[in-house]
Image (cartoon, grey):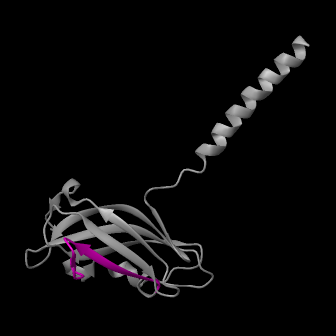
């Protein structure tokens, strides 16, 4: 009887430990946004000045093509960006003016199924402290997801 009780105690401990391990694996990545056949992983953001001295948000993501066909970000995802209930306009900012390379160039590159690509989106800001809300919509089926970026935690950097 004593052996059976010891065995049951050990079995319960292992069962409990196993259940804790199983729960830990289901944690959702806060930076991952799933939108239909595509996923975005938010990697960070910064604020830069454009050529006219206006503040521009540059948000960086990994775009993951989970579909069964080649695609690119521009044809797959449409984003609406707002700040203080104002829809923000997309901005064009050079990353390297000498070779005419902009922050958003990679949005047009084709991504094979199962592959990912580093992309940026850029929008002219109303101010540099209010939160920015982004709604991502899959162009094919209209599935959507949203995220918020707290600008108060970002620094304004010179784009040079």
**Any magenta on residue 98?**
no
**Residue appearing at x 39%, y 67% in the figure:** 61
Q: Does residue 93 appear to the left or right of 5 in the view shown?
A: left
Foreground of the two, 141 or 47: 141
Residue placed furthest toward the right: 1
Q: In which quarter of the image is the N terminus?
A: top right
**Any magenta on residue 87?**
yes
Q: Does residue 70 appear to the left or right of 72 in the view shown?
A: right
Residue placed furthest toward the top: 2
**Residue appearing at x 39%, y 69% in the figure:** 146
Q: What are the residue bounds of the magenta stretch?
A: 76-95
What is the total number of numbered labels drawn onto the structure image?
0
Q: Does residue 117 appear to the left or right of 124 in the view shown?
A: right
Q: Position of residue 11 (x, y in %)?
A: 80, 27
Q: Is residue 54 above or below residue 24?
A: below
Foreground of the two, 122 or 81: 81
Q: Does residue 154 appear to the left or right of 32 in the view shown?
A: left
Is residue 103 visible from the viewing direction of this image? no
**Residue appearing at x 37%, y 75% in the figure:** 135
Q: Position of residue 62 (x, y in %)?
A: 44, 68
Q: Is residue 131 above or below residue 24?
A: below
Q: In which quarter of the image is the C terminus?
A: bottom left
Is residue 26 visible from the viewing direction of this image? yes
Q: Where is residue 60 in the image (x, y as percent from the top left)?
A: 34, 67
């Amino acid at each position: 009887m004593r052996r059976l009780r010891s065995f049951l105690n050990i079995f319960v401990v292992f069962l409990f430990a196993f259940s804790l391990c199983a729960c830990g694996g289901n944690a959702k990545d806060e930076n991952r946004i799933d939108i239909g056949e595509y996923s975005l992983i938010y990697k960070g953001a910064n604020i830069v000045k454009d050529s006219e001295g206006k503040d521009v948000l540059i948000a960086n993501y990994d775009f993951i093509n989970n579909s069964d066909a080649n695609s690119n970000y521009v044809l797959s995802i449409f984003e609406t960006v707002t700040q203080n209930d104002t829809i923000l306009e997309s901005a064009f900012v050079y990353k390297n003016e000498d070779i005419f390379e902009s922050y958003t160039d990679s949005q047009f590159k084709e991504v094979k199924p199962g592959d990912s690509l580093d992309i940026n989106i850029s929008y002219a800001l109303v101010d540099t402290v209010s939160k920015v809300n982004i709604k991502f919509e899959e162009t094919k089926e209209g599935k959507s997801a949203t995220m918020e970026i707290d600008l108060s935690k970002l620094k304004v950097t010179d784009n040079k």
